[in-house]
Amino acid sequence: MKLTVDGNPHDVDVEEDMPLLWLLRDELGYKGVKYGCGVAQCGACTVHLDGVAVRSCQTWAADAEGAEITTIEGLGTPDALHAVQEAWIAHQVAQCGYCQSGQIMQAASLLAETPAPTDDQIDEAMSGNLCRCGTYPRIRAAVKTAAAKLSEV
Ligand code: FES
Ligand code: FES
């Protein structure tokens, strides 16, 4: 089964019903993708599948065949962070950090679809990404900062 992750081509031999989360973490070593609930309820495992945010714990390997996957490790680079990553640092969003790769991937997906989201649109888009540290006000502020930065380019 062929797929591309963060621009890297991979050819893996796995069961078609293996969760994409296991494929990414255990087979390919993309540990930036986090396991929270395993049942599509927390958002910690969010990645982009052909540019769309999905919960990788409830996406199957077969769905990823031939697809372009982007994880937090490929959203930007240390020298060229994605605007969302820059905004997350500027607002010091992360507390324990466990949920944050999923939060950032969800936010990047929101801004790709809705470049200037309202508070309600942000809250709606991010409502499925849980944060036990309660970083929601900072997440909302950071999404707005990232939206402003992206509107400049
Ligand atoms: S681990 Fe996938 S949504 Fe919680
Ligand atoms: S930063 Fe700790 S769970 Fe979100």
Image (cartoon, rainbow, N blue to C red):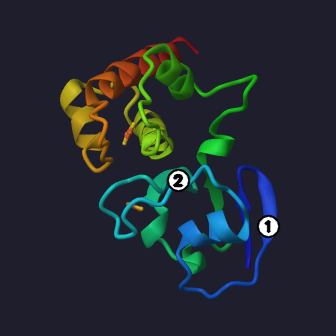
Left or right position of 26 against 56 = right
Q: Nearer the viewer, residue 49 or 89?
A: 89
Residue at mark 2: C-beta within 8 A of ligand 1: no
How far across and how far down the image is residue 120, in percent? 18, 31
How far across and how far down the image is residue 84, in percent? 51, 27
As drawn, which residue projects farthest toward the left?
120
Q: Is residue 42 above or below residue 63?
A: above
Q: Is residue 98 above or below residue 95?
A: below
Q: Counting other residues with Cα less than 10 Å from the Cα at mark 2, is it few (<14), some (14-19), or many (20 or more)?
A: many
**Sequence-wise, which precedes: disc 2 or disc 1?**
1
| Quarter of the displayed picture in which ligand 2 can be seen | top left
How far across and how far down the image is residue 150, in percent? 51, 20
Which numbered circle lies on residue 47? 2
Q: Amino acid at mark 1?
A: His
Q: Amino acid at mark 2?
A: Val
| Quarter location, residue 39 | bottom left
How far across and how far down the image is residue 85, in percent? 55, 27
Which of the image's four quarters has the C terminus?
Answer: top right
Which numbered circle lies on residue 128? none
Q: Residue at x 71, y 24 (%)?
A: 80
Q: Residue at x 52, y 53 (%)?
A: 47
Q: Counting other residues with Cα less than 10 Å from the Cα at mark 1, is it few (<14), some (14-19), or many (20 or more)?
A: few
Marks 2 and 1, Cα distance to the nearest angstrom? Answer: 16 Å
Left or right position of 118 against 89 = left
Q: Is residue 117 above or below residue 56?
A: above
Residue at mark 1: C-beta within 8 A of ligand 1: no
Q: Is residue 79 above or below residue 99?
A: above
Q: Which residue is mark 1?
A: 10
Label 2 element class:
strand
Q: Nearer the viewer, residue 4 or 98?
A: 98
